[in-house]
Amino acid sequence: MEQVRYGGLEAGGTKMVCGVANEKGEWLAKLTIPTKHPQETMPEIIAFFEEQQIDSLGIGSFGPLDLVKGSSTYGSLASTPKKGWPGYSLLGAFAHLNIPISITTDVNGAALAEAAVGAAKGLDSCVYITVGTGIGAGAVVNGTILEGLSHPEMGHIPVVRHKDDRYEGNCPYHGDCLEGLAAGPAIQGRWGKAGVELAEVSEVWEMEAYYLAQAIATYTYVLSPKRVILGGGVMKQRHLYPLIRQALATQINGYVKIGDLEEYVVPPGLGDDAGLTGAVLLAKQALVQKGLKSTNL
Ligand SMILES: Nc1ncnc2c1ncn2[C@@H]1O[C@H](COP(=O)(O)OP(=O)(O)OP(=O)(O)O)[C@@H](O)[C@H]1O
Ligand SMILES: [Zn+2]
């Protein structure tokens, strides 16, 4: 029998990573191109997947996305500031391939990949948070990615301000939500320099940890995940991990029995392939759901 070919697309605001993998998860082909206007970027991606003769496709995309079941614009990008992309249907772009397609957020894809083969391997729940230009989080609950009305927007939860924080916050929708106070651009806006140049300034990271710990406490109370994975550019400041664990312990104050915090709050287990791995797992699930394949994942 010919081998199955799973297509994965990690659609990012900066770059598009495409890959094709077989059943064993071995990469058969890959393509990375910069994200420009969709009219420029998408034809190359579509041609790649056509040529690769994939059997199903998984997409983990930057958002916000319309994932409202039954919506006529299901699988389209919503109000992104990226030129040309609002309203663009990622799902529609591949409809003519006539294959099963599954689409979710990049962070849901990353959570799925981490739960399957990464830092939460063997667990049936986790939350994956990225702290970069924005803050986003995805979750696996009972072995399945979490979607509902559409997809979660965990980066935009309200947080209690740090007593020394005078920064107004920069979320265009909420001002001082989590993303508005703690994503990379908020660090730059508050302290006047990019995070990478502030590595030695302890107040910066103490405040950052205070906000991220609040988010983790909230996700812990609401979702009760078995592990929380933190990635993204800002988390390259490795000293943030112990600071976050400490702040989390203080904030939860023993109310939830978490166990070893070093095992609860962890860095990603997958490297640069995380997004693509998640996308390929979605492709596998899409094929199984269509009944075209019966093996378990
Ligand atoms: N080593 C570092 N230390 C602190 N901050 C960093 C570091 N590297 C990158 N950043 C910050 O992370 C942000 C970029 O995040 P990231 O590298 O995850 O890219 P991104 O893909 O644009 O983010 P997003 O996933 O939100 O779209 C910038 O605000 C940058 O200042
Ligand atoms: Zn917000």
Image (tube, rainbow, N blue to C red):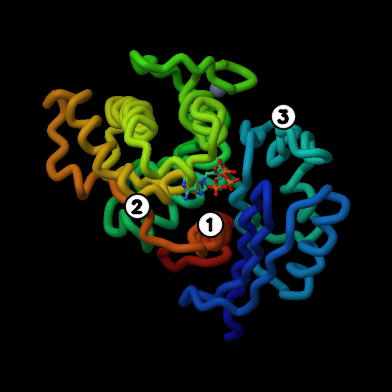
Name which residue type carries label 2: Pro
Residue sitting nearer the eye, 78 or 215: 215
Structural distance between the alpha carbons of marks 3 and 1: 22 Å
Name which residue type carries label 1: Gly
Structural distance between the alpha carbons of marks 3 and 2: 30 Å
Q: Quadrant of the N terminus?
A: bottom right
Q: Is residue 188 left or right of residue 243?
A: right
Residue sitting nearer the eye, 65 or 206: 206
Residue sitting nearer the eye, 82 or 98: 82
Q: Is residue 177 above or below residue 20?
A: above
The mark that comes first in sequence, 3 or 1, is 3
The residue carrying mark 1 is 275
> Can the viewer see residue 140 in this picture?
no
Is the residue indicated by label 3 positioned so its CB lies within 8 Å of ligand 2? Answer: no
The residue carrying mark 2 is 267
Residue 220 in percent (x, y) is at: 29, 31
Q: Answer whether labels 3 and 1 touch (C-beta < 8 Å).
A: no
Q: Is residue 74 above or below residue 121?
A: above
Q: Is residue 151 left or right of residue 52?
A: left
The residue that appears at 46% across and 44% down in the rendered structure is 234
